[in-house]
C-alpha cells in the first residue's frame, strides 16, 4: 500500500506543535492543539474540493491544500514570541504576541468554515470537531483578550476577507489554500498594524524609522497591484501610453503617498534619513558594493543560461542545480550582513523585495521597455510551482531568508542578546533555505537512491541537508561572537532535523514555510 505523503507531512507538523508546547505551555496551548486537530480534518476536505474543481477559486495544482502547516505558523509564532517577552518582562509586547496567536487561530478557523460550507454532503464528523475546537478557542479568547484586542483581531480578519476575495480572483492558480492563508494573513496583519500606528497622532521622533519601511512598502505594492490589475482589464497594457501611465502612477504613489506617510510615521524625511543611515560607516558602503557585485553576478547567470537556450533547437529549461545557484548567492548576500550589520541587511532586504515586486509587475503587465524581455528571460527558471500568472519563487526565496530578520523581537531581546538556540534565530532562513534546501535538492537529485515513502525526495538528500546545516551552524558560531548555544546543541539539531523532514514531505512553498518553522523552534 502506497504511503500518503500528506499524512507524513501532518505527522511532522504535529511533532513540531508538540515540541513547541512542550517548551512553552500557556493558556492557549490547548487551543493550539485543538486547532491543529481540526485543521488536519479540514485539510482533507479542501484536498477533495480542489481535486473535484469545486473550491470556488482556482488554486495551485499539483499540491495539496496545505491547511495544517499554514494554520499553525501564526499561532506558534505568537506563542514563541510571548515566551521571550515574558522572560524580559515586556508586558506590551506580551499582549501583542497574544494578539498574533489569536489572529492566526481566527484566520485558520475562517478558512475551515469556508471548506465546510461548500463541501457536499456536509461532513458531519469534521463539523463536530471544528465546532469543538472553535468553541474552545472562542471561550479562551473571551477570557484572555481585552475588548480592544478583540477588535484588532476582527479588523485583521476583515482585511483578510477582502484581500482574499480580490487577489484569489485576480490571481488564479498562484496559491494553495494554505499559502493564501499564510501570505494574505500576514499582509492583512501588517496593513492593520500600519493603519493602527498611523492613527496615533504626531508620530515619535525618537522611534527607530527602520521597522516602518516594510509595512509601508507592502501596502504600497498591494494598492499598486490591485489598481493596475483592474485598470488593465479595460485597456491594453502593452502600449507605450499605458506603460508611461504605469510609471507615472508608480512615481505618484511613491513620492506623493508613501514618502509623506513614512515622514509622518517616523518624523524624519525618508531620503535624508536613508543617506545618513547608509553613510554611517565604511562597513556599510563595502557591504553595499559587495551586494551590487552579487546582483551583477546573478544577472550574468540569467543571461548565460538564456544564451544556451537561444542556441539550442530544443526547449531548454534550467536544471535544479542551476536554480540552486541563486540559493548560494542568497547565502553569500545574507551571511556577511548578519555577521556585520543587521540593520543595513534589514533595510536592504526591504529594498530588494520592492525591486522584485516592481519588476514582477512590469513583467506581468508587459510594461515597456522591460516587460517582454523579462518574460523571455525568467521563463527559463520556471518550475511546477509557478503555475499561475505570477512568477513568485524568487520572491519566496527572498522572503524566506529575510523574514527571520524582519521578525526579530527587538523589544524582547535581553541586552546580552538571545541566549542558547535563540542566537541562531536571524540565521533561520539562511540555514533552512540557503543551506538545507539547496544541499537536499542537489544531493538528492544527483546521488539519492533511497526515496522517502510517497515522495520523490530521498533519504540521502535529507541527511546531507541536516549535516550541511550543522556545519553551517559551526561556521556561524566561529564568525559571529554574539551566538552562544550553551547547552542547546541537541535542541538545535532536533529542530533542524524536524524542519528537514518537513521539507521532504511538504508540497507547499518550502522557501517560505521552512524558515518560519525553524525560526519558531530556535526562538523557544
Image (cartoon, helix red, strand yellow):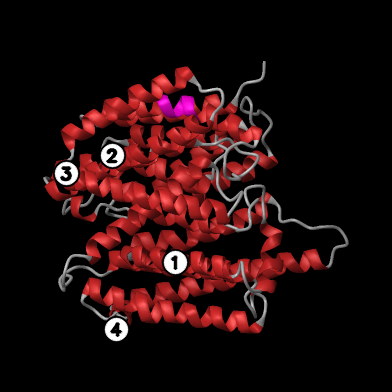
The residue to which callout 3 is attached is 147
Report the residue at 52% width, 70% height from top. 358
Where does the image place residue 112, in percent across and percent down from the top left? 44, 33
Q: Give the camera-side residue of 82 and 429.
A: 82
Q: Earlier in the sequence, mark 4 or mark 1?
A: 1
Q: Earlier in the sequence, mark 1 or mark 2?
A: 2
Where does the image place residue 470, in percent across and percent down from the top left? 44, 41
Q: CA distance from mark 1 to mark 2?
A: 27 Å
The residue to which callout 2 is attached is 102
Where does the image place residue 53, in percent across and percent down from the top left? 64, 37
Q: Give the camera-side residue of 402 and 508.
A: 508
Q: Earlier in the sequence, mark 3 or mark 1?
A: 3
The residue to which callout 4 is attached is 272
Report the residue at 63% width, 57% height from top. 389
Q: Is residue 102 magenta?
A: no
Q: Give the camera-side residue of 240 and 216.
A: 240
Q: CA distance from mark 4 to mark 1?
A: 25 Å
* Corner quadrant of residue 221: bottom left
Answer few, some or many: residues within 10 Å of disc 4's Cα (few below 14, many 20 plus, some between 14 and 19). few
- Element type where label 3 sits in the image: helix
Tag in front: 2 or 3? 3
Q: CA distance from mark 3 to mark 1?
A: 30 Å
Q: Earlier in the sequence, mark 4 or mark 2?
A: 2
Q: Earlier in the sequence, mark 2 or mark 3?
A: 2
The residue to which callout 1 is attached is 223
Q: Earlier in the sequence, mark 4 or mark 3?
A: 3
Q: Above or below — where is 135 with respect to 74?
A: above
Quarter of the image where the N terminus is located:
top right
- Element type where label 2 sits in the image: helix
Q: Are marks 1 and 2 in contact (CB under 8 Å)?
A: no
| Side (left or right) of 454 relative to 68 | right
Amino acid at each position: 500500500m502506497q504511503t500518503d505523503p500528506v499524512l507524513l507531512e501532518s505527522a511532522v507538523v504535529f511533532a513540531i506543535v508538540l515540541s513547541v508546547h512542550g517548551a512553552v505551555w500557556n493558556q492557549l496551548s490547548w487551543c493550539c492543539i485543538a486547532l491543529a486537530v481540526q485543521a488536519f480534518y479540514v485539510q482533507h476536505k479542501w484536498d477533495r474540493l480542489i481535486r473535484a474543481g469545486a473550491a470556488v477559486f482556482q488554486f495551485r495544482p499539483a499540491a495539496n491544500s496545505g491547511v495544517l502547516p499554514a494554520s499553525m505558523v501564526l499561532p506558534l509564532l505568537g506563542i514563541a514570541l510571548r515566551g521571550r517577552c515574558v522572560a524580559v518582562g515586556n508586558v506590551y509586547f506580551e499582549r501583542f504576541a497574544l494578539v498574533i496567536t489569536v489572529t492566526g487561530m481566527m484566520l485558520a478557523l475562517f478558512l475551515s468554515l469556508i471548506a465546510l460550507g461548500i463541501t457536499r454532503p456536509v461532513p458531519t464528523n469534521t463539523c463536530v470537531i471544528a465546532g469543538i475546537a472553535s468553541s474552545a478557542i472562542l471561550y479562551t479568547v473571551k477570557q484572555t483578550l481585552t475588548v480592544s484586542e478583540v477588535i484588532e483581531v476582527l479588523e485583521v480578519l476583515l482585511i483578510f476577507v477582502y484581500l482574499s476575495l480580490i487577489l484569489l480572483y485576480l490571481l488564479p492558480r498562484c496559491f494553495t489554500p494554505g499559502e493564501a492563508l499564510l501570505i494574505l494573513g500576514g499582509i492583512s496583519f501588517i496593513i492593520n498594524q500600519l493603519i493602527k500606528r498611523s492613527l496615533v497622532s504626531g508620530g515619535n521622533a525618537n522611534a527607530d524609522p527602520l521597522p516602518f519601511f516594510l509595512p509601508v512598502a507592502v501596502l504600497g505594492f498591494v494598492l499598486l497591484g490591485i489598481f493596475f490589475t483592474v485598470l488593465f482589464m479595460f485597456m491594453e497594457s502593452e502600449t507605450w501610453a499605458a506603460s508611461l501611465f504605469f510609471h507615472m502612477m508608480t512615481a505618484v504613489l511613491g513620492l506623493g503617498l508613501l514618502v509623506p506617510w513614512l515622514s509622518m510615521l517616523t518624523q524624519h524625511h525618508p531620503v535624508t534619513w536613508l543617506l545618513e543611515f547608509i553613510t554611517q560607516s565604511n562597513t556599510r558602503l563595502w557591504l553595499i558594493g559587495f551586494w551590487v557585485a552579487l546582483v551583477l553576478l546573478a544577472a550574468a547567470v540569467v543571461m548565460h543560461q538564456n544564451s544556451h537556450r537561444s542556441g539550442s533547437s530544443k526547449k531548454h529549461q534550467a536544471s535544479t542545480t542551476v536554480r540552486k545557484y541563486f540559493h548560494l548567492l542568497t547565502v553569500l548576500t545574507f551571511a556577511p550582513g548578519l555577521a556585520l550589520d543587521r540593520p543595513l541587511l534589514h533595510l536592504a532586504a526591504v529594498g530588494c523585495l520592492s525591486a522584485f515586486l516592481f519588476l514582477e509587475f512590469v513583467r506581468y503587465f508587459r510594461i515597456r521597455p522591460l516587460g517582454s524581455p523579462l518574460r523571455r528571460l525568467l521563463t527559463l527558471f520556471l518550475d511546477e510551482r509557478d503555475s499561475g500568472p505570477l512568477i513568485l519563487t524568487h520572491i519566496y526565496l527572498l522572503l524566506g531568508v529575510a523574514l527571520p530578520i524582519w521578525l526579530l523581537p527587538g523589544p524582547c531581546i535581553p541586552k546580552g542578546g538571545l541566549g542558547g538556540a535563540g542566537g541562531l534565530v536571524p540565521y533561520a532562513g539562511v540555514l533552512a533555505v540557503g543551506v538545507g534546501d539547496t544541499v537536499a535538492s542537489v544531493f538528492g537529485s544527483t546521488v539519492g537512491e533511497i526515496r522517502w515513502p510517497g515522495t520523490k525526495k530521498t533519504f540521502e538528500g535529507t541527511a546531507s541537508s541536516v549535516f550541511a546545516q550543522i556545519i553551517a551552524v559551526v561556521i556561524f558560531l566561529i564568525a559571529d561572537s554574539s551566538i552562544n548555544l550553551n547547552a542547546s546543541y541537541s535542541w538545535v539539531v532536533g529542530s533542524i532535523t524536524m524542519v528537514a523532514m518537513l521539507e521532504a514531505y511538504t508540497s507547499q512553498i518550502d522557501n517560505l514555510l521552512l524558515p518560519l518553522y525553524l525560526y519558531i523552534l530556535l526562538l523557544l
